Image (cartoon, grey):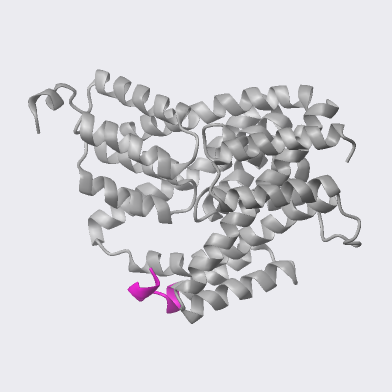
């Protein structure tokens, strides 16, 4: 570790401030979700300050991706923890959720003022169609990827869940519990990872 | 139940069950916030989704903040947001600890392998209600498919072509908005 990286030891007050500030700014100015935000956090924590090493960061990203919730938040929770325990977690977590919380509160306050204007409504209607196109594209990509793997069981889970939700209106929670148990029983082979 | 507790609990469940990133949280939020409690209309929900694509922050947090503010003001948004991240906090710290202790998470991996295809199905279902609203202006399956919104179909078709050609999300949404305004003024 080069000399200049040693200046800010994890655990000091100044460390927490720098940690908060850099995470906050990255969270505030990144549009585009986990896959964009994590490389930025990595370049700050790993490359600039050397608070955590490369391999550990990759492990964290892998776990963050597979845990419930939002990937960027999961990653920031674990990065904070590995760098300086529970206090580190609280700092990174706060710094990650505050920017969207502030932005969205402001938008929510303005929304009621603007949403009834007929021109705004036309714009929003157009954007809804754009958003629908984005979702359709996401689904197409995911389904293609699923079927390209040519594994029978995951495809059956996909079709079964679809029928359960669309045709029989089964509660999403039961679907997830049943599919999780199927996975636990039958899909532990690494080829399914 | 106290509205803050209810918000906390509902978003706790959303945070717990949405495996697989931003898009995967939508069906859960929709089920709770739109279908079950009717805190937001489907229109408002899709607007949140649209806004989330253009502002920083994950959809889950944005929806929690927006719904919380709308239902119970500032403290509502805090209750919903904190509820949403609590499961992440518990599970991520738990797994970090388990990994350190046992170094094997094949059981968790197995569960996730079962969930991944299910999540695709759930996103598919959420996408369908977006489609119904965009083209037929109804939240559920249209009773008469010929009663479609011409403007909606035109924008959706163009947006689909653009998104398949990898146009950036922000440009796409901005252009869709402009197109909606122009076609609307033109009287379609």
User: In the depicted view, which residue is nearer to us: B171 or B24?
Assistant: B171
Check if residue B170 falls in the magenta segment.
no
* Left or right: A51 as drawn, with respect to B160: left
**Residue A140, horizontal then vertical, whole percent:** 58, 62
Q: Decide: is B143 above or below B62.
A: below
**Residue B154, horizontal then vertical, whole percent:** 77, 48
User: In the depicted view, which residue is nearer to us: A106 or A48?
Assistant: A48
Check if residue A189 falls in the magenta segment.
yes
Prevailing secondary structure of the magenta residues = helix
Q: Which residue is found at the position 41% from the left and 24% from the top?
A: A25
User: In the depicted view, which residue is nearer to us: B153 or A151?
Assistant: B153
Q: Which residue is found at the position 85% from the left and 28% from the top?
A: A118
Q: Decide: is B186 above or below A173.
A: above
Dividing the image into 4 quarters, which one contains the N terminus of chain B? top right
- Residue B1 showing in the rendered view: no
Q: Which residue is found at the position 27% from the left and 56% from the top?
A: B99
Q: Which residue is found at the position 48% from the left and 53% from the top?
A: A68
In magenta, the rendered stretch is: A184-193
| Quadrant of the image occupied by residue B142 | bottom right
Dividing the image into 4 quarters, which one contains the C terminus of chain B? top right
């Amino acid at each position: 570790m080069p000399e200049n990286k040693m200046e800010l030891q994890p655990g000091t007050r100044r460390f927490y401030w720098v940690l908060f500030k850099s995470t906050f700014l990255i969270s505030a100015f990144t549009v585009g979700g986990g896959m964009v935000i994590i490389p930025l956090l990595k370049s700050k924590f790993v490359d600039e300050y050397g608070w955590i090493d490369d391999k550990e960061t990759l492990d964290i990203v892998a776990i963050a991706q597979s845990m419930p919730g939002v990937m960027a938040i999961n990653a920031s929770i674990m990065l904070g923890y590995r760098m300086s325990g529970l206090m580190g977690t609280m700092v990174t977590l706060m710094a990650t959720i505050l920017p969207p919380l502030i932005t969205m509160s402001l938008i929510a306050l303005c929304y009621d003022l603007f949403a009834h204007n007929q021109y705004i409504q036309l714009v929003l209607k157009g954007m809804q169609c754009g958003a629908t196109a984005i979702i359709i594209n996401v689904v197409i990509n995911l389904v293609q990827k699923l079927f390209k793997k040519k594994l029978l069981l995951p495809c059956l889970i996909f079709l079964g869940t679809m029928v359960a939700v669309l045709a029989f209106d089964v509660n999403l929670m039961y679907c997830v519990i049943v599919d999780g148990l199927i996975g636990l029983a039958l899909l532990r082979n690494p080829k399914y990872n | 139940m106290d509205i803050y507790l209810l918000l906390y609990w509902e978003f706790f469940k959303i945070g717990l069950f949405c495996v697989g990133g931003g898009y995967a949280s939508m069906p859960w939020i929709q089920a709770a916030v739109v279908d079950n409690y009717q805190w937001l209309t489907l229109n408002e929900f899709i607007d949140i989704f649209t806004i989330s694509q253009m502002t920083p922050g994950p959809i889950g947090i944005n929806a929690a903040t927006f719904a919380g503010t709308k239902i119970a003001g500032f403290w509502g948004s805090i209750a919903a947001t904190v509820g949403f991240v609590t499961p992440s906090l518990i599970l991520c710290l738990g797994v970090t600890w388990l990994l350190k202790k046992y170094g094997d998470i094949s059981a968790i991996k197995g569960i996730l392998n079962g969930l991944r295809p299910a999540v695709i199905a759930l996103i598919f279902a959420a996408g369908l209600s977006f489609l119904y609203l965009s083209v037929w202006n109804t939240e559920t399956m249209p009773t008469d498919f010929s009663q479609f919104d011409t403007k909606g179909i035109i924008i959706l078709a163009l947006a689909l072509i653009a998104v398949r050609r990898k146009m950036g999300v922000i440009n796409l949404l901005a252009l869709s908005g402009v197109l909606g305004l122009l076609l609307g003024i033109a009287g379609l």
